[in-house]
Image (cartoon, rainbow, N blue to C red):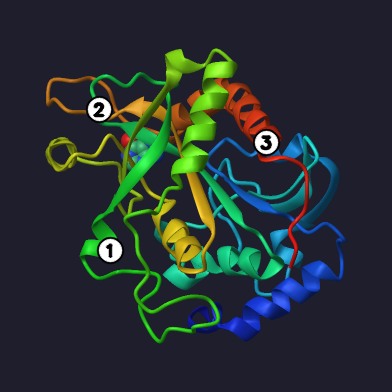
Amino acid sequence: MACAEEDRCSYEVCKETRDWLCARTALRPRTAIICGSGLGGLADALENKTVFEYEDIPHFPHSTVAGHRGRLVFGELRGHACVCMQGRFHGYEGHSASTVTFPIRVFFLLGVEILIVTNAAGGLNPHFQVGDVMFIRDHISLFGLAGLNPLRGPNDERFGARFPCMSDAYDQELLGLAQESAQELGFQSFTRQGVYCLLPGPCYETVAECQLLQALGADAVGMSTVPEVMVARHCGLRVLGLSLITNKVVLSYSSQEKANHEEVLHTSQLRAEGLQKLLTHLLGKLGEGTACP
Ligand code: HPA
């Protein structure tokens, strides 16, 4: 069922997708997880799975990027009801901001309370190593500062308020639990905290751009996540964000390094198991249960 890009985020369209899903699975997820580049394996670890291909779900966009499979997976991890996106949508694929964030509003209507976003990112902080996992403390949206915001346009109060607060975008309690989980698993050597900066992509950054982002106070740079977080906060979801540092950005003209998607996928594969353990442990802490729609 085709749907015009600008209509995709209307309450009625989101509700149609919600109703279609609810008619096909009894599971009511409490947490939604967006699996970033090469990190879709987490969804395979769910128990009692129900899997939907994006192309079969009414109004759902299609994913076009290598490393993003295009499936919505419902299931449980440690008894915690989840829905995982194996493949996300990016502005650089040509999707509008309402298409990129459409699944978040569907999750909200499904009764989801927590959004966990994962992504692959380039490390700007000189202390970060390839393979580090950065818990996102805050973000800088260069899109947003330029007026490109997924919440631009008429506001539907059924989703949230006209002027949502973003100073608390990343939930302190979830961040604390994630750090506690890292400690309990002995993962402190590769877990960090920092500020994620969104750039539109699909080009990786120039040396001068990387220097600028460092000066702005960003620790990692990527091409996703922020629009979904803004829409999630608008509709009251609590957010935890994790960036896997898949490469160090190039900060010197004499460097022989060149950012590339193969390196991003390779690092994701190396750290995927650790990240999966971390999130499974964390969900265990959040306790059993499904959402109460
Ligand atoms: N820049 C932007 N996006 C990315 C990078 C990067 O270096 N690595 C993974 N995603």
The amino acid at mark 2 is Asn
Q: In screen coordinates, is 125 left or right of 211?
A: right
Q: Is mark 3 within 8 Å of ligand 1?
A: no
Using the rendered view, name the quadrant where residue 144 is placed.
Answer: bottom left
The amino acid at mark 1 is Gly
Using the rendered view, name the quadrant where residue 208 is placed.
Answer: top left
Q: State the separation of the CA atoms marked 3 and 1.
A: 30 Å
Q: State the separation of the CA atoms marked 2 and 1.
A: 22 Å
Pointer 3 or 2: first along the chain: 3
**x and y percentages locating residue 27 in the rendered image:** 83, 57
**x and y percentages locating residue 25 in the rendered image:** 86, 61
Nearest the eye: 37 or 202: 37
Q: In screen coordinates, is 55 left or right of 270?
A: right
Nearest the eye: 63 or 73: 73
Count how many numbered circles sit on residues in the image.
3
Image quadrant occupied by the C terminus: bottom right
Look at the picture and state if 48 lies above or below 260. Answer: below
**x and y percentages locating residue 173 in the rendered image:** 49, 41
The amino acid at mark 3 is Leu
Look at the picture and state if 242 lies above or below 132. Answer: below
Q: Which residue is mark 3?
A: 42
Q: Which residue is mark 1?
A: 144
Residue at (52%, 16%) from the top-left corner? Answer: 187
Look at the picture and state if 64 lies above or below 235. Answer: above
Give the image quadrant in which the ligand numbered 1 is located: top left
Residue at (32%, 48%) from the top-left corner? Answer: 139
Q: In screen coordinates, is 66 left or right of 145?
A: right
Whether residues under marks 3 and 2 lie with C-beta atoms below 8 angstroms apart, the answer is no
Could one spot residue 143 in this view of the protein?
A: yes
Pointer 3 or 1: first along the chain: 3
Residue at (54%, 59%) from the top-left corner? Answer: 237
Q: Which residue is mark 2?
A: 125
